[in-house]
Image: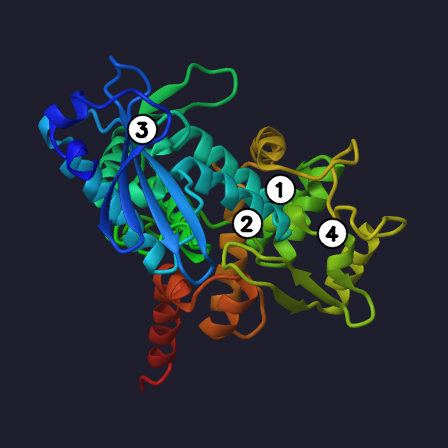
Amino acid sequence: MANKIMSVEGRSKLKARASPYWHTLSSGCQLGFRKMTPTSVGSWLAQAYDPATRTQARKSLGAVDEVPQYQRFDAAKKLAEAWFEHLGRGGTRKIITVGDACTQYVSRVSTSGSPSNAEDLRGRFRRRVNGDPLEKIELTKLTRRHVEAWRERLLRAPVSKGRIGEEPVSQARSPSSVNRDMTAIRAALNHALDEGFVTSDAAWRVALRPISNADGRRDCYIDRSGRQALIGAAAGDLSAFLKGLSLVPLRPGALADLKVSNLHQQLQVLTIGKDKSGQDRRIKLPPQTFEFFKSLCVDKQPEAPVFTRGNGTAWKKDNWKKPFKEAAKLAGLAPAVTAYAIRHSVITDLVTGESGAAPLDLLTVAQLSGTSVAMIERHYGHLRSDLASIALASLAV
């Protein structure tokens, strides 16, 4: 029966039956064709035998009806051989789609102790992958063309901007926003690669390279008096959260994720769980800062959040946005200021010594803030150049 599935005429003469007609491609590797009814176009299958485990794996290839009838055998053969190669490289037999890979990655991030990061990823995948043609593509069939087409759709997708209560305005997405979405999908696909669902990153390695120089400098700086005014203008629960941001150079989401168990009271050390940098880090707190964090942990269980809203729940970005804007307005700050600007301002003070202490080297600042030295250099290196210029000026006679 092998030759009968190779041609259109041969397949048309096959009797309808549940069991496939098989064609051997190589030792242990077969291509199958199944026709369940006399009028069916039929479907294709691949079957591989593993002599080491003495088990057989089978994969459905579908109808392959995107090509003309006379090309379907060759197209199905190509799909089968790609799957055989995947297995030969150590890939798993389980087949998942890009959407499945995103779901699995969110679950992995959530169980690793980063609920806010997991929620951010879930939202990005819901907006950028769910419902997109990319979602249903099997990883073993994913090509660079698929990913590049998704990237083009991402670049063209508009975003809506506007304050609460105002009519949103549609505008083009910024390069930095596009990079963040591409980072999320790249991380999900890399995780699937690590798990063996695919054996190469060729489909996305180049297609998901970030847009260069997309971020620009973070120029929205709030000096110490401005930060104090902001903390004073905020309601009690938000005030404590903003004070925490002013004392340690954490991302707002990382601060919101802190649990009582993250504060080691004997060592006066704050442990930050897996942040955007992808690893834990520890910060030795000065006495006054430690006492502030300690005061927020009184009578709380180890897994309780350190910073809570008035109703006892942890802070999230959607919760602090509106009250932050209100506090910023009362404090006389620019409308464009955000909670993230506090982190930027704290890092700026650490780099320049604006707070009164000696400037820290960029490696130490990077370690404290949970980012790379390259990122600190890119956004804050010019500040050190200014300091160098001042130092050189002092040598003039």
State if disc 1 and disc 2 touch (CB < 8 Å).
Answer: yes
Mark 2 or mark 1, which is nearer to you? Answer: 2
Residue 133 disc label = 3
- Rounded to the nearest whole Å, what is the CA distance between mark 2 and mark 3? 39 Å
- In which quadrant will I find the C terminus? bottom left
- Rounded to the nearest whole Å, what is the CA distance between mark 3 and mark 1? 45 Å
- Rounded to the nearest whole Å, what is the CA distance between mark 4 and mark 2? 21 Å
> Label 4, on which residue?
259
| Res 142 seen here | no
**Which residue occupies the foreground of this view, 373 or 38?**
38
Q: What element carries label 3?
A: helix
Residue 121 disc label = none
Q: Residues within 10 Å of mark 3 (few under 14, many from 20)?
A: few
> Measured along the vertical axis of the image, is residue 309 above or below residue 37?
below
Mark 1 or mark 4, which is nearer to you? Answer: 4
> Label 2, on which residue?
342
Query: Please, what is the three-letter code of the amino acid marked with disc 2?
Result: Ile
Query: Please, what is the three-letter code of the amino acid marked with disc 1?
Result: Leu
**Residue 359 percent coordinates (x, y):** 51, 73
